[in-house]
Image (cartoon, rainbow, N blue to C red):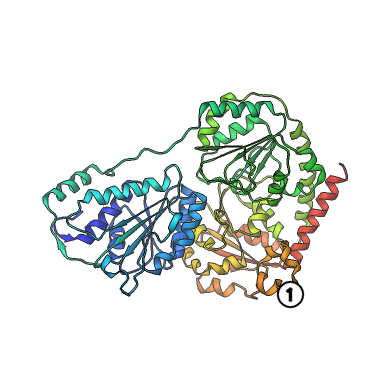
């Protein structure tokens, strides 16, 4: 690092980038701009920095979000001033709500240009409001400020992004001139402090990793409740892909309770002896609801997808509802939780396990497994014999064809719900990602691309047509990263999920204001970005196209055209078949 004669903007920027890297932050997502030139050039010239240039700041932030969701490590999003920084807000909100570490570094104009009408100048201080865990506005580079101050800010910033409550942080860096500034000869005390820091190759400040263990007395009491209740239920909500699940497996196997696993838990494949594959569909059945009434619930992770499960729990007569997750916020929309452990999930499982006893009580489990098998037979038969392309069938066959440790990213609305309701019961272990913090349809393609950043395994993305249109410009990223990514676009000419909501009965406004039909096909979009495109017409063609895509080294779009009314009717058919099969034996 040259400090003998350089401009002060470059010196500070070089310190910032280097300190990020020493803290283990390696990926820098850069959108071009002028005021951010010192930061961008420092990242580009640091040989240890991994960089990706993404034109659109919104996509850049979502890409970093997807990367952090997969790895648990924050990436740095670098933007210029003005609305460029504002474009990061949607990803910041998602990261905040779902506890994803994210670092946004915005370049800014100096104080004397604020509120003067200067070009590309807005008030960027506190621009992300309460959605960041910490923010700092770095003053313009000044020879009177020691370099240690700059380094210390970066150390704190990284720590606050993943400490006890992971989430986004914001560093706003003001520059009087973008690049280059005036030559700067560092005072001797500045030089000496930088040399000492530079030589040891470590961050200036080291923060120990957060690992909060729950109170032992509270653990004992919770374990005793689990031991003494014969009819319990385990719910596995959304869990981040990078989380070590081995301790969860040991705890849940020891309990021997039936397990309801959300698709976003990444654990649908686990607990073959105790899992209930199709609990969401089974909750349609009076017999199942009657026989599955739990006395105690252990809920590990954050929220779950199934609305029917939420309604079932709301009217259940359990005595205890124990929730375990790292987030300190309320993840309890119906106010059902009686005891919450805000802690490291692995620590809870490891420390609780010794207090659990093999009770041998499994009355609820045995009856539920019998009903679940009956339901599995119904779904298997319906989805395997159906030759037309159906949205449940897409979920079923994708989960059947994917191989161990491959990556799956799901769009919100129906793709997530269908994959949660209709996966192949024999599906293998998958790394599952979904932007479920606020359940938005924006930024899904960019998030999925970031999710694939560290994995050599193929990535499958399933999106609805509106989500695809919403993030169409992110297709530019796919060829840039050159990975095996298959985007399955379910094109039902609008927002198909609204067909399942009460507003569908309002015929005078439903079509134009809710489903919002568009009549687009996406072959030209694929051609524009140089991405291979397929449009299968039936389920056999889809299976063949998808199977081929899994061994393709390049991005590919598979567009499947479905009909909203036919999709709704097929979902209703599955419901009726399940209820008829299950309740006639009740």
Task: Classify residue 272 as left or right of residue 133.
Answer: right
Task: Classify residue 467 as left or right of residue 362.
Answer: left
**Which residue is label 1 attached to?**
508
Give the position of the C terminus as an image quadrant.
top right
Quarter of the figure with residue 261: top right
Q: Please state which of residues 32 and 227 is positioned toward the viewer in this rendering.
A: 227
452 shown above or below 245: below
Name the residue at 72% across, 45% down.
312
Q: Quick check: can you spot residue 219?
A: yes
Q: Residue furthest right?
A: 584
Name the residue at 46% across, 51% down.
68
Q: Residue furthest left?
A: 188
Q: Quick check: can you spot residue 483?
A: no
Quarter of the figure with residue 252: top right
Instruction: Tell me where residue 113 appears, x and y as whole percent.
Output: 28, 70
Name the residue at 83% across, 52% down.
577
Task: Classify residue 572 as left or right of residue 195.
Answer: right
Instruction: Tell me where residue 3 appears, x and y as whole percent.
Output: 17, 55
Instruction: Tell me where residue 551 appears, x and y as whole percent.
Output: 56, 56
Mark 1: secondary structure: helix
Instruction: Tell me where residue 571 appears, x and y as whole percent.
Output: 76, 58
83 shown above or below 324: below
């Amino acid at each position: 690092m040259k400090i003998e004669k350089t401009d002060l903007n470059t010196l500070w920027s070089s310190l910032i980038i280097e300190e990020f890297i020493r803290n283990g932050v390696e990926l820098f997502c850069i959108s071009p701009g002028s005021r951010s030139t010192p930061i961008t050039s420092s990242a580009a010239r640091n040989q240890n920095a991994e960089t990706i240039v993404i034109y659109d700041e919104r996509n850049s932030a979502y890409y970093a979000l997807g990367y952090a969701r997969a790895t648990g490590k924050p990436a740095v999003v670098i933007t210029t001033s003005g609305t460029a920084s504002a474009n990061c807000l949607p990803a910041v909100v998602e990261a905040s709500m779902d506890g994803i570490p994210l670092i946004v570094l915005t370049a800014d104009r100096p104080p004397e240009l604020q509120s003067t009408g200067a070009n590309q100048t807005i008030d960027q201080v506190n621009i992300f409001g309460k959605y960041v865990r910490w923010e700092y506005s770095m003053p313009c580079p000044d020879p009177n400020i020691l370099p240690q101050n700059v380094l210390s800010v970066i150390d704190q910033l990284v720590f606050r992004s993943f400490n006890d409550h992971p989430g986004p942080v914001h560093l706003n860096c003001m520059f009087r001139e973008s690049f280059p500034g005036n030559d700067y000869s560092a005072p001797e005390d500045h030089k000496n402090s930088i040399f000492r820091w530079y030589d040891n190759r470590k961050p200036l400040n080291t923060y120990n990793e957060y690992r909060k263990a729950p109170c032992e007395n509270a653990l004992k009491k919770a374990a005793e409740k689990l031991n003494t209740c014969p009819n319990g239920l385990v719910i596995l909500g959304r869990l981040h892909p990078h989380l070590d699940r081995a301790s969860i497996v040991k705890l849940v196997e020891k309990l021997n309770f039936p397990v309801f696993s959300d698709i976003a838990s990444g654990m649908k494949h686990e607990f073959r002896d105790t899992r209930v594959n199709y609990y969401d569909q089974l909750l349609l059945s009076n017999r199942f609801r009657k026989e599955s009434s739990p006395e105690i619930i252990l809920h590990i992770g954050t929220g779950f997808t199934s609305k029917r499960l939420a309604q079932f729990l709301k009217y259940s007569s359990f005595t205890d509802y124990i929730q375990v997750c790292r987030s300190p916020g309320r993840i309890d929309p119906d106010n059902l939780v009686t005891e919450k452990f805000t802690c490291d999930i692995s620590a809870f499982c490891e420390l609780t396990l010794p207090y659990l006893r093999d009770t041998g009580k499994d009355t609820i489990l045995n009856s539920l497994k019998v009903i679940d098998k009956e339901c599995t037979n119904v779904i298997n038969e319906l989805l395997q014999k159906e030759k037309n392309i159906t949205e449940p069938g897409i979920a079923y066959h994708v989960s059947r064809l994917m191989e161990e440790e491959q990556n799956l990213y799901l769009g919100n609305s129906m793709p997530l719900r269908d994959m949660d309701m209709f996966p192949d019961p024999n599906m293998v272990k998958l790394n599952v990602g979904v932007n479920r913090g606020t359940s938005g349809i924006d930024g899904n393609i960019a998030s999925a691309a970031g999710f694939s950043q560290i994995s050599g395994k193929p990535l499958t993305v399933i999106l609805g047509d509106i989500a695809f249109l919403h993030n169409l410009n992110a297709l530019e990223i796919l060829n840039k990263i050159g990975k095996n990514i298959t985007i399955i676009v379910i094109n039902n000419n609008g927002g198909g999920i609204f067909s399942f909501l009460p507003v569908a009965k309002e015929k005078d406004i439903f079509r134009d204001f809710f489903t919002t039909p568009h009549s687009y096909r996406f072959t030209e979009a694929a051609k524009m970005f140089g991405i291979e495109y397929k449009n299968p017409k039936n389920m056999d063609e889809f299976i063949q196209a998808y199977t081929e895509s899994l061994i393709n080294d390049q991005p590919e779009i598979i567009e499947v055209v479905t009909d909203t009314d036919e999709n709704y009717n097929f979902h209703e058919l599955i419901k009726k078949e399940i209820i008829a099969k299950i309740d006639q034996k009740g």
